[in-house]
Amino acid sequence: MSPSLRPAVVAKTSAGVLLAAAAAAGLAAPSAFALPAFYTPPTTLPAQDGALIRSTAMKLGAGVNIPGVASLPGKATRIMYKTTDTNGQAVAVTGTYIEPNAKYYGGVDGNLARPLVTYAEGTQGQGDECAPSLGLENPLGFQAGSVNVSYETPTIYNLLNRGFAVVVTDYVGLGTPNNVHTYVNRVDQGHAVLDAARAALKVRGATVTAASPVGAFGYSQGGGAVASAAELHSTYAPDVNLKAVFSGAPPADLSQVMRTADGTTLTAVIGFAVNGFVQTYPQLQPILDANTNNAGKAALKAIANACIGDGA
């Protein structure tokens, strides 16, 4: 995959949204979600990537029945940290660090340092209410006319139950107001995953340290994000003690993914991608405007505030 989403490639892809956007235009548009004040970034951001901007205790959501997990498996902290986007701009990203209740008994190499998994969730959507940190707090959310199901929660809980600490990124633009989530943007996602691991070490009460082995885990959108993290690790974040990566079903060929999704219950992912392209490359807006009718424009606006369940 190329180092970033090239404007020329995106311009060709934007025409492909016509049918998908028109098909989605009949959906009721969720309203913009009123985020808690925590999610609004400060005016000035730290210089260091992975710097912890703020944190606060949060409750993990109840009501998730997982075999072998009798109670909530850890103590969660909502975090905001600094990363750098594709255009080299400083960006605040939110997420969740979870300190497990379970003891870690060491790996096959005898290392007793508690491992950290930097976890990238699969497609959640583009509306702020779809942020993974909000889903972990409320696994089945009905907010602002939108449905948000935290389907990654069982996997995260099982990691915690094995004694692994977990940090979950909300990705760039998902959960922070006034910008659009840059869905499937390789650089933004890889940086967010790596900087989440950096930020986790700074959370008060965290038992992970610089000696902790770090694993990156993700499927679908998350698979692409952690694959990018693996590729960018040596140049962007060599200080992260990355030891293993599980990248499941990464959407590496976006053109093929869009052709496959078009006309299905996943059609909205095309809108997520196009909206994200324009967020990263504003010069694409006139091209998109010229290639969409009023129904298409309305669909893209609705999709920008939708979760994956709404799109289906």
Image (spheres, rainbow, N blue to C red):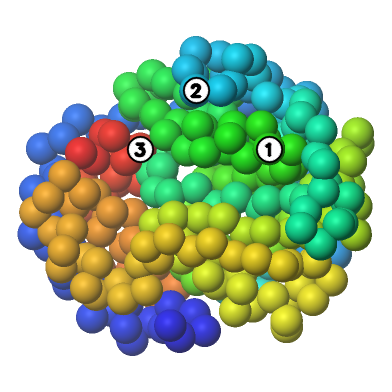
> For mark 2, what is the residue?
67
In this rendering, the answer to whether 73 lies above or below 117 is above
Q: Residue at x 45, y 31 (%)?
A: 150
The residue nearer to you, when weighing 182 against 157, is 157
Secondary element at tag 2: loop
Q: CA distance from mark 2 to mark 1?
A: 13 Å
Pointer 3 residue: 307
Query: Toward which corner of the image does residue 210 lie, by quadrant?
Result: bottom right
Judge left or right: residue 27 versus residue 243: left
Q: Quadrant of residue 79?
A: top right
Name the residue that disc number 1 marks.
162
Q: Earlier in the sequence, mark 2 or mark 1?
A: 2
Disc 2: CA contacts within 10 A as few (<14), some (14-19) or many (>=20): few
User: Which quadrant does the C terminus fall into?
Assistant: top left
Q: SS class of the residue under badge 1?
A: loop
Vertical relation: 101 (above or below) 262: above
Q: Is residue 46 above or below residue 227?
A: above
| Badge 1 density bin: few <14, some 14–19, many ≥20, Cα 10 Å | some
Which residue occupies 47% across, 38% down? Answer: 152
